[in-house]
Image (tube, rainbow, N blue to C red):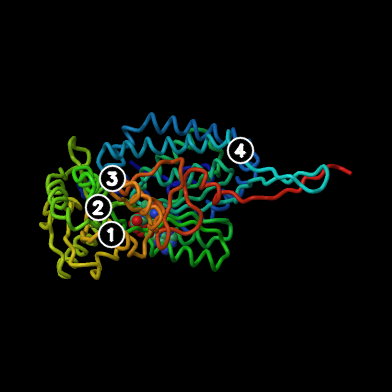
Amino acid sequence: MDLLNLIGGRWVEGDGEEFADTNPARPSEVVARGRFASAAEVERAVAAARAAAPEWAASPHHARAAVLVAAADLVDAAAEEWGAELAREEGKTLPEAVAEVRGSARILRYYAGEADRESGEIFASPRPGENVLVVRKPIGVAGLITPFNFPIVIPAWKIAPALSYGNTVVWKPSSLVPLLAYRLAQALTSAGLPDGVLNLVYGEAEAGSAIVDHPGVDAISFTGSTAVGRAVIARCGELGKPVQTEMGGKNASVVLADADLDHAAEQVCLGAFRSTGQKCTATSRLIVASPVADELLERVAERAARLVVGDPLSPGVEMGPLVSSAARDRVTSGVARAVDEGAKPLAGSSPYNGEGWFVPPTVLDLPGTGVDFWRTELFGPVVGVVRASGTEEALGLANLSDHGLSAAIFTRDLGVALQAVERLDVGVLHINSESAGTFPYVPFGGVKQSGFGPKEQGRAAREFFTHTMTVYLGAPA
Ligand code: NAP
């Protein structure tokens, strides 16, 4: 499959370097090929987005919504096929991949629905005959930079609100997952998106920086690692450019002594190993109350050892490979470092020797919180465990992180659950369910080193993709 960049409504080959999109389960298999956009093409993409902006912003919200709905229908119709492509290029299992594609259609529809919801506010005025309106306006050209781990749903949750609220877009997807980017752009153009409203440029860090730096791009929405996100925030600060970043996590699941241990073990494993642990909200720290620790860990280790690892397209496979050799090396060396620092593997100690970027689901009994593993996001199927004497200590340990994306707590005690709501410094909290998982109609995003700027999804997205204008609407004299 040959992939093309989308610039000003034309599909173009790209003047930059050639790239090959490979299957992480069978790295010799090329899924798709293409060429990155050159610096001049990124310039053209920004110029096209600027040129298209006034007309798109002025078009009725319902006309913009109609394009999103038509695109959602196309995405849904192709969900099985594109899900298989997603599994082949990224490595998550087929059922998860198909669900992700369908999830992106749901997001397109949600933001189409914005046309039917209130679009501003009206206040009274102390002056006779006057009203004060607060209206919403698009921010202009949005530069969107997306990560590899959700190749279609994360782009959809940026592109859909950007377009619905009347912005035009220059989008750089992760170079690891170009095929699903192509599919989403295809759906939107086939649905009737006018030329230049969405521009897709393939590239790596350089293309991302060029978009961030470009004076023709009015605002940046980035999702990816904390290191890159912080650099993007710093650059946008220098340029005075609005920026929204969703970044890494080191998410804790807390299992208290009164929890249903079978349920907690199952959910901890889903949180840690689904999508091969390549979720920003994946569980990578497990804090368990000492009295039930042995019982819980036996269940978690047993479930991890039983997990079926293999080709994501094969029926019954529960966990695929990591996305790349670099990801595999990062995870295996992180596990080795933890073991050097005194961690005891309860599951997954032996490396995988076959083809593909596989690692085993791994459970590490940590010697304490002083180890590097406690602080560093590995972004793989590895969970490290510590014990806590009770609720107070467990919640303190959950907060003992520079990150603050998501957490989960397992308890039957409503008072303790409410205490967790009060105490935990995270953007997303699950009570009695795994730390990952999000609905498109409620805010999503992290605090501390996990997020910066307005949240994504639901109506929260409006805070980033629009600005308000306050209108003092007086009666004519
Ligand atoms: P990443 O390496 O930070 O890359 C993210 C995107 O930024 C990619 O498109 C990447 O391009 C681009 N990029 C790299 N350097 C850049 C630079 N200097 N300037 C501008 N753009 C640049 O992250 P990833 O490995 O794709 O994704 C995994 C990370 O994302 C994890 O840390 C995960 O926790 C986080 N994440 C967070 C959320 C959230 O909502 N909080 C959701 C998903 C993932 P190339 O890779 O093509 O070079």
Mark pair 2, 3: CA separation: 9 Å
Check whether the beta carbons of the residues at disc 2 and disc 1 lie within 8 A of each other: yes
**Residue linked to disc 1:** 394
Between 445 and 244, the one lying in front of the other is: 445
Between 91 and 415, the one lying in front of the other is: 415
Q: Of marks 2 and 3, which one's residue comes earlier in the chain?
A: 2
Q: Quadrant of ligand 1?
A: bottom left
> Could you tell me which residue is drawn at 51 percent across and 47 percent down?
461
Q: Position of residue 403 (x, y in %)?
A: 36, 61
What kind of element bears circle 2? loop
Q: Nearer the viewer, mark 3 or mark 4?
A: 3
Image quadrant in which the C terminus is located: top right
Mark pair 2, 1: CA separation: 8 Å
> Could you tell me which residue is drawn at 58 percent across and 64 percent down?
240
Name which quarter of the figure residue 163 lies in: top right
Between 390 and 108, the one lying in front of the other is: 390
Name which quarter of the figure residue 364 lies in: bottom left
Q: Of marks 3 and 4, which one's residue comes earlier in the chain?
A: 4
**Residue linked to disc 3:** 412
